[in-house]
Amino acid sequence: MSVNVREVNGNNVPRKPSFKGVKWLIAGLAAVFVAVNSFTIVPAGHTGVTLTLGEVSSNPLSEGFHVKAPFIQTVEKMSNKIQVYETPASAVSKDLQTVNSKIAVNYRLVTDKSPDMYKNVGVDYQTILITPVVQECMKSATAKYNAEQLITERESVSNEVKTALDNKLNTYGIYIEKFNIVNFDFSPEFNTAIEAKQVAEQNLLKTKTEQEQAKVIAKTEAEKKVIAANAEAEAILAQAQAQADANKLLEESLSNKVIAYEQIQKWNGVMPKVTGNSNGGLLIDVNIDDAATTSAAN
């Protein structure tokens, strides 16, 4: 620090140092520091939890600008965005098959529960709450299904696990948006057995299909034979009916010829009588009996 020198009665006397500028600088820095600690900004998708000398306030701060008491209050930011938790899980199925799976949980922290979560659990609630609950619910649900059902009914398993997670975590303010089973992994022996079963089922299905096709073909051929036999029978019947009709006509023709011949043989040579009737018509009277009698007398 430089020392100012002033002249008194012709003598040089050193001046006293001035701290006024330093005081203003310190005061300004202190004011800025106090001002900076007198407000907080809660970012989007977060909730502010106010701590007053370590005591948690039950009223969460929403997004935006907020004033707080400097050096006395602090604000912790709790995320309310959807977060993803992925983890491997090992369980045993109903038929005692070891099942290794990879699961993904989409969850979020409910805004109103943020102060309670911070007070009772802290900010690492994923490790403290979600991890053990997910493993427990996954083991419980897996034990209700055999290994094959875990594959064919994966959606039902996922829904059951999600419901169990909601029941256990909702009270803490954690809401499960979605639960996904990314994949199941079984032992090599079980995978081999499943593959062999699938091959056997495919072969059985192929055999059944071939049998059904053979039945259809046989049925079609039988129907064709029946249709052909019916057609042949109808043709024979029609031919027989035509022959019968022809025979009948022949018999009637012969009978008529015999009658005509007999009448000719019995004719006495007398021409038939033609008379009129009241309707203006002509009547021909041929007395066959008289002719026959006359012929016999001759």
Image (spheres, grey):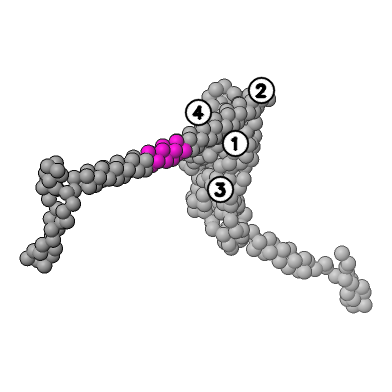
Q: Quadrant of the C terminus?
A: top left
> CB under 8 Å between callouts 1 and 4?
no
Q: Which residue is mark 1?
A: 131
Q: Which residue is mark 4?
A: 144
Q: CA distance from mark 2 to mark 1?
A: 30 Å
| Disc on the earlier residue, 4 or 3 | 3
Q: Quadrant of residue 200?
A: top right
Gap between marks 4 and 3, in whole Å? 28 Å
Give the magenta-colored segment's residue range. 226-241
Residue 108's label in the rendered image is 3
Q: Between tags 4 and 3, which lies in front?
A: 4
Query: Disc 1 on helix, strand or loop?
Result: helix
Residue 182 at x, y percent in the picture: 62, 39
Placement of 250 over or under 27, stated as above or below: above
Q: Verify CB contact (< 8 Å) between mark 2 and mark 4.
A: no
Pointer 2: residues within 10 angstroms few (<14), some, or many (20+)? few
Amino acid type at mark 2:
Glu
Please give the residue where the numbered disc 2 appears in the rendered image: 189
Task: Name the residue at 58% across, 54% down.
Answer: 46
Q: Which structural element holds mark 3? A: strand
Q: CA distance from mark 1 to mark 4?
A: 21 Å
Marks 3 and 2, the one that precedes in the sequence: 3
Q: Nearer the viewer, residue 191 or 101?
A: 191
Which residue is located at x 14 percent, y 47 percent? 291
Q: Sequence-wise, which precedes: disc 2 or disc 1?
A: 1
Q: CA distance from mark 1 to mark 3?
A: 14 Å
Q: For the residue marked with disc 1, what is the amino acid? A: Thr
Circle 3 crowding by C-alpha within 10 Å: few under 14, some 14–19, many from 20: some
Which residue does the image show at 92% across and 74% down from the upper left? 11
Which amino acid, by three-letter code, is at mark 4?
A: Lys
* Dot 2: element: helix
Say if residue 99 shows up in the picture: no
